[in-house]
């Protein structure tokens, strides 16, 4: 898919105030600092469309971007940010779960995980929550530039093995690096296919 236009639409913390249009929507979710906003900039080819930061907790609201005038990409705040209290860390911010559970336009969520780390409980719990709430999702491994190809393969296999302890099949996954533009075509192609399927319904 070629990105002809990408524009910021609005930020808010209330699912009821999100755009009313029924355009298909995709949301990036994951731990703070995993690279959600950077990935939005990478796949749209717009350097500072979504605000990024080296300090976790940069994105605080639900941010809607309109792509090619026919689908929405959503940047969500991260979970598991150390500066919030332990109990708040466990219960994912209410407006995020409300958005994911209630937003009819959401075709798929993408759970971002840092490819360097072993599977983290909070990510596994989050995927569990998505499953229980019937929210379709894929996994996006981020920061692949930080590992050599062999290590990438090993880390993905380790992740797969842990997931297969609770899931019957491994969710779709993508290996990406925002700094190297890795995984861009695969991800856009996947979204394009889902968009086409939505048009058929
Ligand atoms: P919050 O909004 O705080 O939840 O974070 P986020 O998930 O949106 O992360 P963000 O995109 O702001 O990136 C966090 C940090 O990781 C920044 O310093 C980015 O430059 C860095 N980063 C993001 N993607 C990559 C990547 O693919 N490779 C490398 N090496 N660094 C990355
Ligand atoms: Mg962000």
Image (cartoon, rainbow, N blue to C red):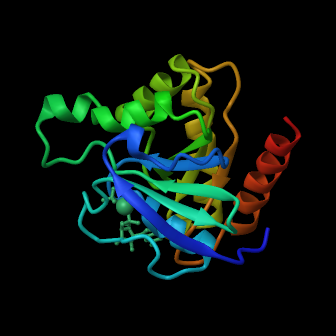
Residue 124 located left or right of residue 137: left
Of the pair 118 and 173, the residue shown nearer to us: 173
Say which residue appears at 63% left-offset and 32% top-offset.
Answer: 136
* Residue placed most toward the observer, 77 or 8: 8
Position of the N terminus, as image quadrant, is: bottom right
**Quadrant position of residue 144:** bottom right
Q: Residue furthest bottom?
A: 47
Against 40, is 83 above or below? above
Report which quarter residue 7 is drawn in: bottom right
Residue at the farthest right position: 200
> Where on the image, by quarter, is ligand 1?
bottom left
User: Which residue is depicted at the point 44% across and 43% down?
Assistant: 118
For the point 55% across and 80% down, the residue is 46
Image location (x, y in percent) of residue 176? 60, 63
The part of the image, by quadrant, that contains residue 122 is top left
Q: Is residue 112 visible?
A: no
Q: Position of residue 56 (x, y in %)?
A: 25, 60
Across and down, in percent, residue 156 comes to: 61, 46
Q: Residue furthest front?
A: 20
The residue drawn where x is 75% and y is 67% is 185
Q: Nearer the viewer, residue 20 or 94?
A: 20
- Left or right: where does residue 35 sit relative to residue 173? left
Height in image: 84 above or below 201? Answer: below
| 27 relative position to 24: left or right | left
Q: Position of residue 132 (x, y in %)?
A: 52, 17
């Amino acid at each position: 898919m070629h990105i002809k236009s990408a524009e910021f639409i609005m930020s808010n913390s209330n699912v009821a105030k999100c755009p009313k249009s029924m355009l298909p929507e995709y949301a990036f979710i994951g731990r703070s600092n995993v690279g959600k906003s950077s990935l939005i900039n990478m796949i749209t080819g717009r350097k500072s469309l979504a605000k990024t930061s080296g300090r976790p907790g940069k994105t605080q609201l639900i941010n809607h971007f309109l792509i090619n005038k026919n689908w929405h990409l959503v940047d969500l705040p991260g979970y598991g940010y150390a500066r919030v209290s332990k109990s708040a860390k466990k219960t994912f911010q209410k407006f995020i779960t409300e958005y994911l559970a209630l937003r009819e336009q959401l075709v798929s969520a993408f759970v971002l995980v840092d490819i360097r780390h072993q599977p983290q409980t909070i990510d596994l719990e989050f995927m569990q929550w998505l499953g229980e709430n019937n929210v379709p999702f894929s996994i996006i491994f981020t920061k692949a530039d930080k590992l050599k190809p062999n290590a990438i393969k090993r880390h993905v296999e380790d992740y797969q093995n842990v997931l297969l302890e609770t899931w019957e099949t491994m969710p779709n996954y993508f290996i990406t690096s925002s700094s190297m533009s890795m995984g861009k075509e695969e991800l856009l192609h996947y979204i394009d296919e889902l968009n086409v399927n939505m048009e058929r319904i």
